[in-house]
Amino acid sequence: MSNVVLLDSQSHRKLRVHAQAAAHYGDNQRFVAVVVNEFHALAMHYPILFSKDADTGQFYCGAMLGFDSGENLFLDEHRAMSAYRPLNLQRGPFVTAGSDLAIDLDHPRVASSGDQELFTAAGEPSTYLQSVMGLMRELRPGAERTRIFIDTLMGLKLIEPMTISARFDDGSNREFTGLYTINRDQLKQLADPAVLDLFRRGYLQLIYLMMASLDHVSALAQRKNRSFLPGGDLPGREPLSPGAA
Amino acid sequence: MTQRIQSIVIVGGGTAGWLTAGIIAARHQGRMKTGFTVTLIESPNVPIIGVGEGTWPTLRSTLQKMGVSETEFFRNCNAAFKQGAKFARWTTGADDDAYYHPLMLPQGFTQVNLVPHWIGSHSGRTFCETVCPQGQLCDDGLAPKMITTPEYQAVANYAYHLDAGKFAGFLQQHCTTKLGVRHVLADVTKVNQSEYGDIRSVDTQQAGEIAGDLFVDCSGFSALLLGKTLGVAFKDCSDVLFCDSALAVQVPYETPESPMASHTISTAQSAGWIWDIGLPNRRGTGHVYSSRHCTDEEAHQALMRYLGPQHAHLTPRKISFHGGHRETFWKNNCVAVGLAAGFLEPLESSAIVLVELSAKLIAEQMPANREVMDIVSARFNDVTHYRWGRIIDFLKLHYVLTQRSDSAFWRDNVAPDTISDRLKNLLHLWKYQSPWFFDEFDRLEEVFPAASYQYVLYGMGFRTEVEPGDNVATGTMAAKLINDNFAMTRQMRSQLPKNRDLMKKIFEYGLQPI
């Protein structure tokens, strides 16, 4: 359950938050919603795909972080801040309510033992809170830009379903359905004015980032395979260096 | 006579006219640039009858091929899901007498016939629940798909309930703006024929003379072209199917949140039956009855009893009809579709599916020129005759399997001289072997597949003798399929949303095209 209230420098003066990445704080997501502003940073590490919101059926963009429900194979890097952490994970217990910042007081990150204060003793926003406000300034218009990007692609029939199948070293198979990507054939057949329009709006670059990011699927599978190695799933192992596949 | 067929003229602007226009225009889009035209003449004065609000799953592919957005269709036609029909009180007339005719095929239908295995198992389960999840989905009030399921795709097979009046208007809009169909609002005053009897043109009051190469008669019961002009007679089937009257009434929901059935409910009465279908904004109900077996007043009382005292203020609309069809459907250069071709009581929603199948056949077999048209029309008549005959038999099947003898209507319905020889033969055969997908049903596009016969026969307690040894060869496979069905049923019941909830989401968010 959640208990979302507007953030208030008086009543929330003493509130503290756990900001670091951890499964029990909600970072255990295999697929997290992302916005187009992040594509550049995301495309370094993760497959970027489309999926549908289970409640509304509307398309959104997401980064794939694992194969199984609750599996984020990048937790170590997110904790070490050695790989880009998607905004929707960074924002932690914060949401926007209109143009105001709100906080879910029942979020597991909100605790007196938290490593980050929200306000200084003088009642000013802490550096941490300022960074949250900064990322919200990215996230909110980003969501709108992402929606328009998706609508444009849908209108051009540039989105097609895909299924990711993987076979792992422990002999198990996974099928990840409900994913969608760029329809390359349709892209090739686009008329010149449509291509020019996509280019001018910066969409062509986003499209190619999404297409290129699919190469990370096999790296992601190898990452999962490493967790089957002796000691591979033990906590406290050496963080993997980004890109070591 | 080697005149090319380039100009299609449809007379009549109801569901049949616009569906036919859309199907033909969509199929022949590529020829539009070289002079192929589809013109629909609609009288501004003749009201649309709006037969039946039930359809078959074929309508999904029909609409998809026409390029219609399913979301727009739902929103503009007050359309809703239909997962089949529930027949209550048809077998014994008792309170708990009911069975489903669902739209999903029995599990593994093309691999094993599960009927003898179900009979041999004496499991106490109904045939429907043994072989298919859909009866339970209907009982639970669940939708046949999710908001994430793309347009026209199904988790459980489905058709639609729809508002026929709105549907015709919606199709008109789509046909004229997207498919290049020419719409002429005019009354036909005279039909002009050539010396061979072909229709050359029609004179209209408002738009002058309109010529054509092929005329499609969608003028409704009046059958202006095929009946009145070309003199093709009507073949009455009231000796087999007795119903000839209906009292129809639209019933409001208690609240906009009231549950909404995703199946047609057909409840047998003493001289007919009552239909009850759920649209998003209202229910459509009506009493279909035989005027030879009950008075209008009795029929009215039965309908009001069914609806309950809270709806006593509603005033049903009386519709009289003649069950039957034209003796020929395509004569010279004129083919009839919809009510102009015939009408049967809407017991299994056969009206719109027959329009689709006929229009599709015309579109697919569109004769290149007048010379070969007679070859095509002979085929068309052959297939269409077969379909009407089979539909009449299938509707009659619902009546002949009854055990009711509480009124003359039901007693008369089982009289041997009211049953066709083909149906009698089949019933005889089915005592020893159950219908399955490759025997008897030899046409590519059966209106009612063998599965439908299975659901009705075994839903109504028909018994086929089973030789236990016969089940040995396929026993393992059958057991697996039945278990698969139970697993599938559990999964669907846990995943699918309530029918009402999904309808609300479709109105709010829409379904995605992929």
Image (cartoon, coloured by chain):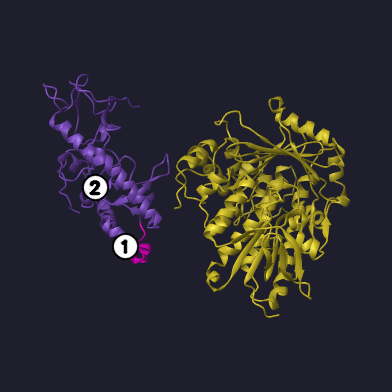
Residue A161: which numbered mark, if any? none
Chain of the residue where label 1 is placed in the rendered structure: A
Q: Residues within 10 Å of mark 1 (few under 14, many from 20)?
A: some
| SS state under label 1 | helix
Q: Quadrant of residue B247?
A: top right
Out of B421 and B234, give the one closest to the viewer: B234
Task: Identify the residue position indicated by label 1 in the image.
Answer: A195
Q: Earlier in the sequence, mark 1 or mark 2?
A: 2
Colour applied to chain A = purple
Read off the magenta span. Answer: A182-194
The residue at which mark 2 appears reads as: A37
Figure quadrant of residue B38: bottom right
In this picture, residue B388 sits left or right of residue A132? right
Residue occupying the point 62% across, 67% down: B364
Residue B29 vertical position relative to residue B147 in the rendered view, above or below: below
Mark 1 or 2, which is nearer the eye? 1
Q: Which of the chains is yellow?
A: B
